[in-house]
Amino acid sequence: MTDQAQSEYYQAIAREFLRRRGASFFLSPRDLAVIADWERRGVPLRVVIEGISRAFDRLRDPSRGTKGIPLSFCEPQVLKAMAQHTDRAAGRKKPPAPRSAKVDKARGEAGRCLAALPAGDRELISLFEKAAGLLAKSSPDEEALERIDGEVDAVLWVRASVSELDGLKRHIAGDLAGRGAAEVEAAARTRLIKSSRRKQKIPYVSLFYY
């Protein structure tokens, strides 16, 4: 990507995100790092814009306001839009891979996680049993699977220790100097959940991750 194209990529994403968020007119260093990662992955601009639009359109309670939302909030929908874009592009070149392959992979990951979870962890066991039931169907309910991922994230967030969370917030506050507590907390939540999933080997069950 040329310098001019890169600048236009960043500016277009910033304009759309700040328009939807309705907050200050600049991006944090963490927001810029998210855009840099999308650029590195080769996510087209229109796919990023589509993902940002989906993320804000799906807010469960828009009345609570959007000013503290970081760009990383949009990442799941951007990645989903990218997966769909890739599938469409593959379909133009060759027959698409069977959707069942994604379902099989997600089902296998859910089963592996269920087998590894401690017997007393009823919260996560219940969620992954529900996911396994959905993935056992020929046409799983993808929105229901996304909701389960959100519930798993919520469990991992609640279980975070105070010391772990405080340390993460202090680290992130350096990147978000001058920003509000809500934005720092949202960024900390995203990072903590990703780290917890990786360390505990808790997979996603939404098909767009496969």
Image (spheres, rainbow, N blue to C red):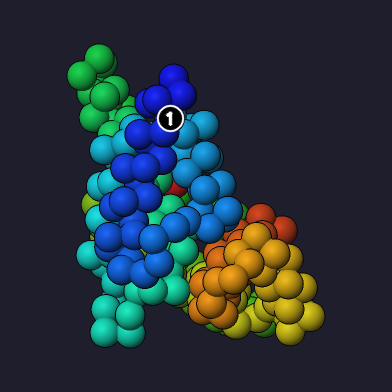
Instruction: Provide residue 143's location: percent of width, then percent of height.
Output: 28, 62
Residue located beneath label 1 in the image: 6
Q: Residue at x 33, y 85 (%)?
A: 64
Point out the image quarter for the C terminus. Answer: top left
* Above or below: residue 71 compared with residue 184: above
**Taking 192 as reference, is 209 left or right?**
left
Q: Residue at x 47, y 56 (%)?
A: 27
Q: Residue at x 52, y 48 (%)?
A: 32
Quarter-of-image position of residue 117:
bottom right
Q: Give the structural element (helix, strand or loop) at label 1.
A: helix
**Taking 101 as reference, is 28 left or right?**
right
Instruction: Provide residue 176's location: percent of width, then percent of height.
Output: 60, 64
Instruction: Provide residue 100's location: percent of width, then percent of height.
Output: 33, 39
Q: Is residue 204 visible?
A: no
* Above or below: residue 42 compared with residue 109: above
Foreground residue among 156 and 51: 51
* Above or below: residue 98 compared with residue 133: above
